[in-house]
Image (cartoon, grey):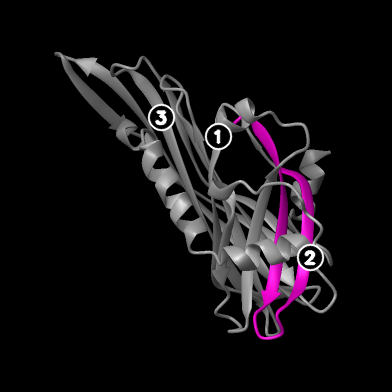
Amino acid sequence: MRNKFFKLLLTVGLTSSALFAQCDKSLLEKIKATIGEKRKMVDALTVCKKWLYKDELSIFVMTFPVAGTSEENLEDGLAEYDVHTVVYDTKQKAIQNHLYQEALYSSDAVRLEKIRIDTARYNLNKDTRAFGITAIYRGASRANPYNIDSLDLYISDEKSLRKVLEVVISEDGGEWDTNCAGDFYDSKSIVLITKHKTNGFYDLSLKRTSLSSHTYLKNNECEETQKPKTYQTLPFKYDGKVYKVYKSKKQKEALK
């Protein structure tokens, strides 16, 4: 199981660069000028994608280091990033919606390696489809591997572009002696849309599957034992502004 923690950063970097290469650079610069942004984008963390939900719309995620970030820290991945998320109408050649978030992402020992736009069918009601932005973090420690992917869902409507959900969809890590002995865990989640509505939006359900294992040296061979998988379901309801984990009256009372 531990082998999955050691991924080639070169591969991740090439993938990020390829995503940026797919963007229309002249259009990126036009959008950047329109929103009044003068900083240089972080190419590896700037992505764009056509939103097949509506042929004329494209999504741009433009990432910039916060003011005062040194080149050395930026090269080492020790930085915070401001993000401009833009929904662009290619037919009208105009920005439909724009959201600026200061210090949205932070990268340090657990480094922000990649951003991905998710245009799966997140139909929150018959008139509203959200899109996702996934931030992929990779830890640098060999003895204490740690990786995490977070998903944010956004709604673009006539009023604004806004974030409505923040969840972790993948997390794995552990601690070992870098030879064999150690403990590891792996958790994966998916977001499902239910048929029940709250405040006009369908309730969401986060289905989480977790697995843990222990490795040890026996007769000069590295052995592994796995615990049974565990399953958890977290219900989310829309409160009129964002989705929040729903707690029953009994759960609320237990927390008091």
Q: Nearer the viewer, residue 240 or 27?
A: 27
Q: Residue 126, relative to residue 25: is it above or below?
A: below
Q: Which image quarter is the N terminus in?
A: top left
Element on which disc 3 rests? strand
Please identify the residue farthest to the front as the structure is shown. 26
Mark 3–mark 2 distance (CA, rounded to whole Å): 47 Å
Tag shown at residue 184: 3
Element on which disc 1 rests? strand
Labels 3 and 2: the sequence-earlier one: 2
Disc 1 residue type (three-letter): Arg
Q: Nearer the viewer, residue 209 or 83?
A: 83
Q: x, y percentage for residue 78?
A: 62, 29
Disc 2 residue type (three-letter): Thr
Q: x, y percentage for residue 233?
A: 57, 55
Tag shown at residue 34: 2
Q: Is residue 214 left or right of residue 75?
A: left
Let me know if residue 255 is in the magenta part: no
Q: Residue at x 63, y 27 (%)?
A: 73
Residue wearing tag 1: 111
Labels 3 and 1: the sequence-earlier one: 1
